[in-house]
Amino acid sequence: MEWFAAPDFWLSRLVFQRALAGLYVVAFLATALQFRALLGERGMLPVPRFVEQVPFRRAPSLFQLRYSDRFFAGCAWTGCAVSAALLAGVDGLLPLWAAMALWLVPWALYLSIVNVGQTWYGFGWESLLLETGFLAVFLGNDEVAPPVVVLFLIRWILFRVEFGAGLIKMRGDACWRKLTCLYHHHETQPMPGPLSWFFHRLPGPLHRVEAAANHITQLVVPFALFAPQPVASAAAALMILTQLWLVLSGNFSWLNWITVVLAVPALALPSDRGPGPDAPLWYEVIVLAVAALLLFLSHRPVLNMLSRRQVMNRSFDPLHLVNTYGAFGSVSRIRYEVVVEGTRDTVPREDSDWREYEFKGKPGDPRRWPRQFAPYHLRLDWMMWFAALSPAYAGAWFAALVERLLENDRDTLKLLRRSPFPPGEPPRHVRARLFRYRFTTWRELRATGACWERTYVREYLPPTRLARTAPRP
């Protein structure tokens, strides 16, 4: 079938595949380095406890069949290794069927992780990586030209990411319609980056221009993805520029980067490759069958986008094949942060020697400037932002975090930037207090050197000690 292949997109496919493999490496690396404290046998939300309560059909995962920390680590590091091989181009050296099988490995491994990841893996970009990674299985290698239908489905994902986000903004917070949300967003976003202070201090009219440009990029430009070239390439290029602007302004894990990756297949990058050999019949049949399935499943995110009760970041099937996306349907006007402290004093008082725990990414010491971590994902830091919005977001994991801090748990302390207590000398009490944070002004920055100013609001968790002295099994 001549129409099946898109020979003008050889290079676009190559760039897409290598960039996606790079994001897989980051995702698996973040999992391997953080899972023990979050999900391990002694973690805050242990996988064994989860799989006892949730059946396989609702959360298909290798870890439903067997779990141990060693097995989980092996899966995470295997995902890293296979993704690194894909990044190096090993799939191009294999037969078509073997290349497809190799791309299936990181998808299946990461699906197994996400489906038992609970709160720690409840972010939209997890499903986005899985949906994109599933399509990558059917994109082929150097034996065949890129299939038109798969390139179309990749654009369809990008359309839903951008258009869904645009709709949720217009239906959500009135400040998006008034073009004033960015008066607050750079300051109150989950994890500011090193340039966020400067973005926040841009003039008000420029913030309004930012918001208006965002609406155009998310509500108008996505339709141009399905226009003939060079219009589709221009639309994709504009989306890439917008995402790079967001990369500069904050830390959004790999959300911006995977959106950039999704835009690449819409670019008709110059290539000297010819049409290439005809695709084998079995490959065409599989690709068309998968495309039909994904188009059928797409009715659910379409209905969601059309609904006045549109929801963000929802998976409609346990395999995360077709999902709905969105971000920042509402924007906080005030930034709150939970500050966690411990003391060695036997009887905790207000004037005790309270020492603050420092997190890697979330604001803490007002003088410590935010760092760039994205596309790496600091899961605990992100959830601390949600916990500051409402204790309801903290659920069972916050109490478990406090318990592990009281034990000086090594794996938990690895998630932090610094613990104020040396090994062998854990705190006797831990407390949490809620503070209001705001970016300093230019004058305050010059006078104090601090990028943040914080004000005590209330007690978040009273001084707490271990309820037992025996070590946990």
Image (cartoon, rainbow, N blue to C red):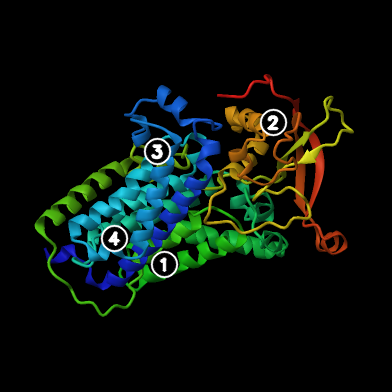
Q: Is the residue 208 above or below the residue 312 in the image? A: below
- Which of label 3 and label 4 is nearer to you? 3
Residue 235's label in the rendered image is 1
Q: Earlier in the sequence, mark 1 or mark 2?
A: 1
Amino acid at dot 2: Leu
Amino acid at dot 4: Leu
Amino acid at dot 1: Ala
Residue 276: where, in percent of width, then height?
A: 17, 72
Secondary structure, mark 2, is helix
Q: Residues within 10 Å of mark 3 (few under 14, many from 20)?
A: few
CB-based contact (under 8 Å), mark 4 and mark 1? no
* Disc 4 to disc 1, C-alpha distance: 15 Å
* Disc 3 to disc 1, C-alpha distance: 44 Å
Q: Residue furthest right?
A: 351
Residue drawn at x 40%, y 36% as measured from the top left: 115
Q: Nearer the viewer, residue 105 or 262?
A: 105
Q: Residues within 10 Å of mark 4 (few under 14, many from 20)?
A: many
Q: Nearer the viewer, residue 368 or 285?
A: 368
Q: Earlier in the sequence, mark 2 or mark 3?
A: 3
Give the residue pinned by disc 3: 71
Residue 142: where, in percent of width, then height?
A: 22, 67
Quadrant for the N terminus in the image: bottom left
- Which of label 4 and label 1 is nearer to you? 4
Residue 151's label in the rendered image is 4
* Disc 4 to disc 2, C-alpha distance: 52 Å
- Which of label 3 and label 1 is nearer to you? 3
Residue 406's label in the rendered image is 2
Residue 436: where, in percent of width, then height?
A: 76, 43
Residue 345: where, in percent of width, then height?
A: 83, 30
Amino acid at dot 3: Phe
